[in-house]
Image (spheres, rainbow, N blue to C red):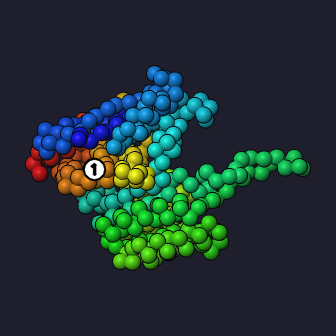
C-alpha cells in the first residue's frame, strides 16, 4: 500500500519551504519509486480564515488516518489579537493531543560545512550530533491544579503542578533507549531528583526500564542545571538525552543555539504504537512562520527538508532514502550555497527555490 502522508504547510514561510519538500517527494517518486499518497490540508491562520478554526475536524480525521503528518508552521501578526482558544497555535496543540504525540525528538547536529559559521568555539561544536528527547504531553505545562487564584487576603498567586505517572515516564524512556541503541548506546536522563518528587520517580522509572529492557545501553543521570552547563561547555559528551517537558524545552533550545541557525533544525514528535504496531507521528521544523521574511522568497528550506528526512526514517523505515536527503543538503552547503540566515563570507547567497532545486540536483548525483 502507498504511504499515506498528510501535508499541512500552515502560515508565513510554511508554504514556501514546503514547496521545496514537494520537489524532493517528486524526485523520490520518479527515481526511487517511493510513492506517497499525498493529501494537503489547512492549519493555523490559513485554516481560521478559510474554515473558521485553527484545525477542522475533517483535517484532524485526515491526520488520524495518515501514516505521518508533515507540518510547516503556524501563526502571524494577522491573528495575534485573537483570544487564546482561537489562536493559530491551537492547530498544532490539538494535533499533538489528538494523535497522542508524547515524545519530541530534537536533533542538534552541526554539519561540517557550517561548523565555521557557529559563533561558538569551533572545536566545541564541530561534529556535534546529539538527540534530545523531550516528553511533550505531560509535566508542569499540563498538571492540575493550575491557574491564577485570588487568596482570601485579596492577593493573587499563580499555580502550576508537575505531575508524571510511571507510564508517562516509561513510554518516553523506551523511545529514548531505542534511539540510543540505534546510535551510540549512551543515554543521559535529566531530572531534578534532588529537589522534586516527580524527578525522583523519573529517575527511578528510567533506571528500571534501563536495567530490565535495555541493559546494553549505558545510562547516566544528570541534574538539569548541571546538564545545561555541560551542554554549553562540553556538548560532545552527549549522545541521546531524555528529559521532562519543561527541562526538555529549555535544553533543546540551548542545544539548538549550539548549532547556529533555526533554519537548519528539524524535529519529530512520536506517539505510542497502537495494537497494529502503527504509531502516529508529526514532523516539523523547529522554527516558526517567520512573518518578518514571509513572502520574500528567502527562507531557508533545509529545516523542513530535514524534517521530511526524519519522516522517511521514523515513520517509514526508509533509512537509505533519509540519508540520501540529508547528504544532498550537506553537499549543497559544502558547495557554497547559503540562504541569508546562514550566509558566510565568500559563499553564494540564494533564495528558497534555488536552494530546493540545488538539493534535488545533488540527489540526482547521489
Ligand atoms: P520564528 O522561528 O518564526 O522566527 C525567528 C527568527 O528566525 C526570525 O527572524 C525569522 O526570520 C528567522 N527564521 C526562522 N525560520 C527561518 C528560516 N527557515 N529561514 C530563515 N530565517 C528563519 O519565531 P518567532 O518570530 O518567535 O515567531 C513567529 C511566529 O511563528 C509566531 O506567530 C509564533 O507563534 C509562531 N511559531 C510557530 C511555531 C510552530 O508552528 N510550531 C513555532 C514557533 C513559533
Ligand atoms: Mg521552546
In the displayed structure, 124 sits above or below 68; it is below
Q: Position of residue 303 (x, y in %)?
A: 33, 47
Residue 296 visible, this angle = no
Left or right of 40, for residue 357: left
**SS state under label 1:** helix
Q: Residues within 10 Å of mark 1 (few under 14, many from 20)?
A: few
Of residues 88 and 269, which is closer to you in this image?
Answer: 269
Residue positioned 49% across, 64% down in the render: 170
Reply above or below: 199 against 256.
below
Q: Nearer the viewer, residue 207 or 225?
A: 207
Quadrant including the N terminus: top left
Residue at 46%, 49% (x, y): give it: 101
Q: Nearer the viewer, residue 331 or 197?
A: 197
Residue 6 in the image: state x and y as whole percent.
34, 37
List the residue tagged with mark 1. Answer: 316
Q: Residue 20: where, in percent of width, then height?
A: 26, 37
Q: Is mark 1 within 8 Å of ligand 1?
A: no
Q: Against 212, is 141 above or below?
A: above
* Of the pair 56 and 149, the residue shown nearer to us: 56
Q: Residue furthest right?
A: 153
Residue drawn at 32 percent across, 32 percent down: 39
Vertical order, 207 against 149 (above or below): below
Which residue is situated farthest in the front direction here? Answer: 275
Q: Is residue 50 left or right of residue 18?
A: right
Q: Is residue 169 visible?
A: yes
In the rendered view, does 126 fall on the left or right side of 230?
A: left
Query: What is the total number of numbered labels drawn onto the structure image?
Result: 1
Q: Position of residue 256 (x, y in %)?
A: 42, 57
Residue at 9% over, 48% down: 365
Residue, far top: 50
Amino acid at each position: 500500500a502507498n504511504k499515506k502522508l498528510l501535508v499541512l504547510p500552515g502560515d508565513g514561510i510554511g508554504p514556501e519551504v514546503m514547496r521545496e519538500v514537494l520537489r524532493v517527494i517528486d524526485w523520490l517518486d520518479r527515481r526511487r519509486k517511493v510513492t506517497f499518497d499525498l493529501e494537503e490540508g489547512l492549519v493555523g491562520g490559513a485554516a481560521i480564515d478559510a474554515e473558521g478554526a485553527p484545525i477542522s475536524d475533517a483535517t484532524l480525521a485526515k491526520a488520524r488516518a495518515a501514516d505521518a503528518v508533515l507540518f510547516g508552521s503556524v501563526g502571524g501578526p494577522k491573528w495575534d489579537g485573537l483570544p487564546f482558544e482561537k489562536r493559530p497555535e491551537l492547530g498544532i496543540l490539538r494535533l499533538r493531543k489528538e494523535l497522542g504525540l508524547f515524545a519530541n525528538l530534537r536533533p542538534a547536529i552541526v554539519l561540517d560545512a557550517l561548523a565555521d559559521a557557529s559563533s561558538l568555539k569551533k572545536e566545541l561544536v564541530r561534529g556535534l550530533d546529539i538527540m534530545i528527547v523531550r516528553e511533550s504531553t505531560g509535566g508542569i505545562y499540563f498538571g492540575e491544579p493550575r491557574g491564577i487564584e485570588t487568596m482570601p487576603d485579596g492577593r493573587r498567586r499563580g499555580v502550576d503542578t508537575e505531575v508524571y505517572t510511571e507510564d508517562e515516564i516509561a513510554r518516553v524512556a523506551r523511545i529514548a533507549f531505542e534511539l540510543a541503541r540505534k546510535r551510540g548506546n549512551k543515554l543521559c536522563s535529566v531530572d531534578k531528583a534532588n529537589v522534586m518528587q516527580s524527578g525522583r520517580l523519573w529517575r527511578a522509572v528510567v533506571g528500571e526500564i534501563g536495567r530490565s529492557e535495555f541493559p546494553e545501553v549505558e545510562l547516566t543521570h544528570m541534574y538539569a542545571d548541571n546538564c545545561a552547563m555541560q551542554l554549553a561547555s562540553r556538548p560532545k559528551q552527549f549522545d541521546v538525552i531524555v528529559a521532562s517537558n519543561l527541562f526538555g524545552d529549555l535544553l533543546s533550545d540551548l542545544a539548538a543555539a549550539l548549532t547556529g541557525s533555526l533554519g537548519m533544525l528539524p524535529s519529530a514528535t512520536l506517539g505510542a504504537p497502537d495494537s497494529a504496531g502503527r504509531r502516529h507521528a508529526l514532523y516539523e521544523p523547529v522554527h516558526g512562520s517567520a512573518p518578518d521574511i514571509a513572502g520574500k522568497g528567502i527562507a531557508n528550506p533545509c529545516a523542513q527538508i530535514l524534517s521530511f528526512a526524519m519522516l522517511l526514517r521514523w515513520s517509514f523505515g526508509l533509512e537509505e532514502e533519509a540519508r540520501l536527503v540529508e547528504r544532498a543538503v550537506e553537499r549543497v552547503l559544502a558547495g557554497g550555497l547559503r540562504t541569508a540566515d546562514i550566509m558566510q563570507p565568500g559563499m553564494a547567497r540564494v533564495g528558497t527555490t534555488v536552494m530546493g532545486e540545488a538539493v534535488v540536483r545533488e540527489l540526482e548525483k547521489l
